Image (cartoon, helix red, strand yellow):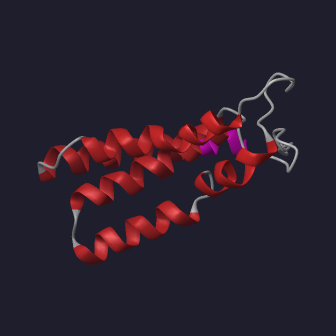
Amino acid sequence: MKRVAYALVGLVLVGVALADVITQHTGWWQLIVFAVAPDLSMLMGGGKGLQHGRLHPRAVPVYNAVHRFWAPVVLVAIALLLRDPGWLAAGLAWSAHIAIDRSLGFGLRTREGFQRTQAA
């Protein structure tokens, strides 16, 4: 049930971000970059001898930091205060990325780099 809720939240966030970009005539770059950027942390997570699906422990703090909701929520709040639709789209896209990841079963990582187990 949690995964379905995350999927719905993710889809709503994507829709609001797209509506923001289209109606406010902002650039698309923030939306695209912030939808993809959280997974760039996985680039530093590769290495020899790692099991399939495991991140190198050096990448875990960065991966976990960019896959928590607090940072994009702060970005959205600041964008709303400054009335900046481009950065609002960025924060919404980042939040959508996290929600969609969670809906697909990808959550935070353990110190060792494995997916933390999630309750259904």
Quarter of the image with the N terminus is: top right
Write down the region rendered in magenta. Answer: 1-6
Quarter of the image with the C terminus is: top right
> Residue 108: in sight, yes or no?
no
Judge left or right: residue 13 versus residue 62.
Answer: left
> Image height check: is 74 above or below 38?
below
Magenta span contains residue 104: no
> Image height check: is 86 above or below 96?
below
Seen at 83% across and 44% down, the residue is 118
In the rendered image, which quarter is residue 70 located in?
A: bottom right
> Image height check: is 15 above or below 52?
below
Nearer-the-camera pick, 36 or 81: 36
Seen as rendered, the residue at the extreme left is 25
Judge left or right: residue 19 versus residue 55.
Answer: left
Residue 57: horizontal and vertical position, in percent? 81, 45
Nearer-the-camera pick, 6 or 90: 90
Residue 99: horizontal and vertical position, in percent? 57, 45
Seen as rendered, the residue at the extreme front is 48
In the rendered image, which quarter is residue 40 located in?
A: top right
> Residue 91: in sight, yes or no?
yes
In the rendered image, which quarter is residue 59 located in?
A: top right
